[in-house]
Amino acid sequence: MAGSFDSLNSAQQQLLEQAQGFAYRKTTGGEELKIHFYLPKGLKEGPKRPVFLFFFSGNWDRGNIVQFAPHALHFVERGAVCGLVEYSTSSTHPGSTPMNSTYDGMAAIRFVRRYQEQLHIDPEKVIAMGAGAGANIAGCTALGAKIKDPDDETGISHVPNACVLLSSIIDIKKTSFAFKQFSAKPAEAKKLSLSSMIDHSPPCPVIMIHGTADRMTSIDEAMAFAAKMKRRKKNEFQFHAFEGRDSNFYNLNMDPMSFEAALNLIDTFLVDHLFLEMNDDPNGASLVSWREQDF
């Protein structure tokens, strides 16, 4: 069994070695948090690039930084700069709360805008994408959570220009699985509940993808949130339900067909909203096995 874990860790390390890590923030304990960037070929040739920031899934307690590496490598081939974001969790940074994780997400967005010239990115094409707690972080930035990072003295906006929510944790209630992370500070649960932000949310296009068999956040809760978002005309919003899928269907190593189907929906959404160019290069990134009947 130890050999299996060693092999897994080695594979993850190899994925990170393909990226360039930049420290974007220090925790209260003085530890650096990094964004691991995958950069497209000819980065500084032509117009500035869109940038994706990926926030791994979990329950603010753990997660895998390379979870979104396959998604990132796809969008790098589509010409974007892609960053896998380390954010603090209670397992990696004891004492960390979901609010700390959300501050990290806000800081990551400010970082790419602050260093837009070095990264050759368009500060008006910042896409936040996450799953589980990572989707909640992305959603809080996109919907304008009424919280302020005490370490922010930049004046730079932390609101992305587009947002992708996969199997998102939406509202944190006392009866929900996610609430256990708020036992020390229960008042913060409402502040990070996405439904509470809809009425004052900024105009950020959002696509939400959710499995109908999700055991963490029920499809009923997801659909109720989607209905509220659709009534909010200021936000361009899409919702897609994947029949019979649980909360991890979008991962390549869990469900390759659903991975590609979800990636296709995201890609099309971003093309429609002018964040990506139409993919008409036969030698470029492609989805080779996607079939509509598979989801």
Image (cartoon, grey):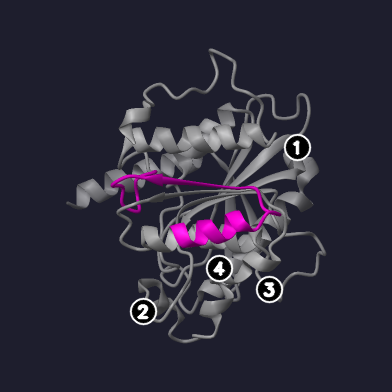
Image-based side of 117 in relation to 172, left or right: right
Seen in the picture, residue 144 relative to 251 is either above or below; the reply is: below
- Three-letter residue code for mark 1: His
Label 1 with label 2: CB-CB less than 8 Å: no
List the residue tagged with mark 1.
Answer: 120
Q: CA distance from mark 3 to mark 2?
A: 23 Å
Query: Label 4, label 3: how many angstroms apart (C-alpha)?
Result: 12 Å
Horizontal arrangement in the rendering, residue 264 relative to residue 111 (left or right): left
**Nearest to viewer (mark 1 / mark 4):** 4
Image-based side of 183 in relation to 55, left or right: left
Residue on which the image places disc 3: 146
Highlighted range, magenta: 223-250
Q: Separation of disc 1 and disc 2 at Cα? A: 45 Å
Provide the residue designation for mark 2: 175
**Looking at the picture, how far across and down is residue 185, in whole percent?**
51, 86
Q: Residue 130 at what x, y percent from top left? A: 51, 53
At x 71% / y 50%, what residue is drawn?
Answer: 112
Foreground residue, 18 or 266? 266
Work out whether mark 1 precedes mark 4 in sequence or the reverse, and give the earlier one: 1
34 over 52 or under it: above or below: below
Quote the CA–CA distance across marks 2 and 4.
16 Å
Find out whether residue 139 is within the magenta segment.
Answer: no
Q: Tell me the element at label 4.
A: helix
Q: Earlier in the sequence, mark 1 or mark 2?
A: 1
Q: Nearer the viewer, residue 283 or 270?
A: 270
Q: Is residue 236 magenta?
A: yes
Q: Secondary structure at mark 3?
A: loop
Q: Amino acid at mark 2?
A: Thr
Neighbour tally class for label 1: few under 14, some 14-19, many 20 plus, Cα within 10 Å: many
The secondary element bearing badge 2 is classed as loop
